[in-house]
Image (cartoon, rainbow, N blue to C red):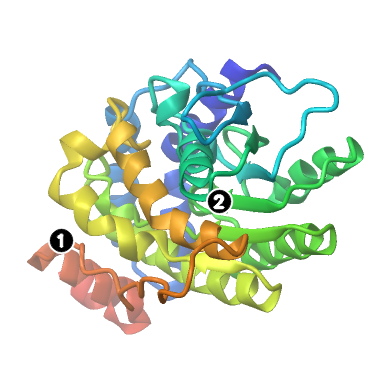
Amino acid sequence: MDSSGRVAVDNNRLLREVGATVAATAASAGASWAAYNYLNGQATEARTVIPHRTDDAPNGDGIYLPDGTGPHRPARGTSVDVYLVVFGDSTAAGLGAETADQTPGVLLARRVAAETGKIVRYANKAIVGATSKGLEAQVDAMLITRERPDVAVILIGANDVTATNGIRSSAKRLGEAVTLLKENGAEVVVGTCPDFGVITAIPQPLRSVLRRWGLQLAAAQRGAVRAAGGRPVPMADLLAKEFLAKPEHMFSPDQYHPSAAGYALAADILIPEVLEAIGEWGPAPLPQPPEVSEAVEQNRLVSRVRRLVGRPGNQATARG
């Protein structure tokens, strides 16, 4: 499949499979058929709101120097100090950015070079539309070429939610990818599943159902990453407030992927852990993230559906 096809798959997954997410969530909680029909109708509405993408993320692979220049094409025998590789989905690839300099991987590569004075080689192995099921294959493809990164950054999880992949199995697969990278000498920083509550293009209460699923996945990812020796970064907790406050600024025109400003904020959040991973953060303690995301819209309808989905005995209330 070519790159434009993968982009379409990524966006179609949100639009096509979000109804299946609702069905699985409602069924597992014993919610009524009426509640399912209502949420599934909202999934249909979401399909008409979020446009299909046919473009690809800009490519910023190359060598970045402390003087701010780059990307330079790697040449045989070129000496680099840090090899940074990004794995994951369309967010890891930087879909929604207009230029390579706006993608999260390039932002991180430039920051590492500028703040450490080191020469950084950067490569992006992320695949648009990827879920945790394909993560280990991304790592394997790199290892086959005998490339060994010093630090790897993984952004994954949103497509596992829209594809209704199991929470525990998705987290387990992420942990296995982290283990594989660690066994091959890389330090690993993982941005966990984002907060679907900030995607206002998805109507309520469907948005809250997806948000609940995503936050549960993020919590499971955090445990799996730590157990594998990686460094989890709670993207939902750290990004949600800004994205909800300024959606027109933080999202790209497709209303789903981040804009240049959104990716810049993500890079700001990831850079302390990346620098710490390579021993360049210094003596100051790392910033402490909040324990729970505060950015969630509250209203009577959302609260009612949450109670319904969370309590199997509430079918009669839903029908009323």
Q: Quadrant of the C terminus?
A: bottom left
Residue at figure coordinates x 59%, y 51% from the top left = 153
Residue at figure coordinates x 33%, y 81% from the top left = 311
Residue at figure coordinates x 53%, y 67% from the top left = 232
127 and 46: which is toward the camera: 127
Q: Is 175 above or below relative to 126?
A: below
Q: Amino acid at mark 1?
A: Glu
In this picture, residue 282 sits left or right of residue 179: left
Q: Is 226 above or below relative to 118?
A: below
Between the residue at mark 2 and the residue at mark 1, the CA separation in whole angstroms equals: 24 Å
Residue 202 in view in this figure: yes
Q: Secondary structure at mark 1?
A: loop
Q: Secondary structure at mark 2?
A: loop
Q: Are marks 2 and 1 in contact (CB under 8 Å)?
A: no
Which residue in the protein does label 2 denote? 156
Which residue in the protein does label 1 denote? 297
Q: Which of the numbered marks, if any, corresponds to residue 67? A: none
Instruction: Give coordinates of residue 302: x percent, y percent.
Output: 18, 64
Res. 238 image quadrant: bottom left
Residue at figure coordinates x 54%, y 65% from the top left = 276
Q: Is 16 above or below relative to 272?
A: above
Q: Quadrant of the N terminus?
A: top right
Instruction: Give coordinates of residue 129: x percent, y percent.
Output: 58, 36
Q: Amino acid at mark 2?
A: Ile
Q: Earlier in the sequence, mark 2 or mark 1?
A: 2
Instruction: Give coordinates of residue 97: x percent, y percent.
Output: 39, 26
Neighbor class of circle 2 (other Cα within 10 Å; few <14, some 14-19, many 20+) is: many
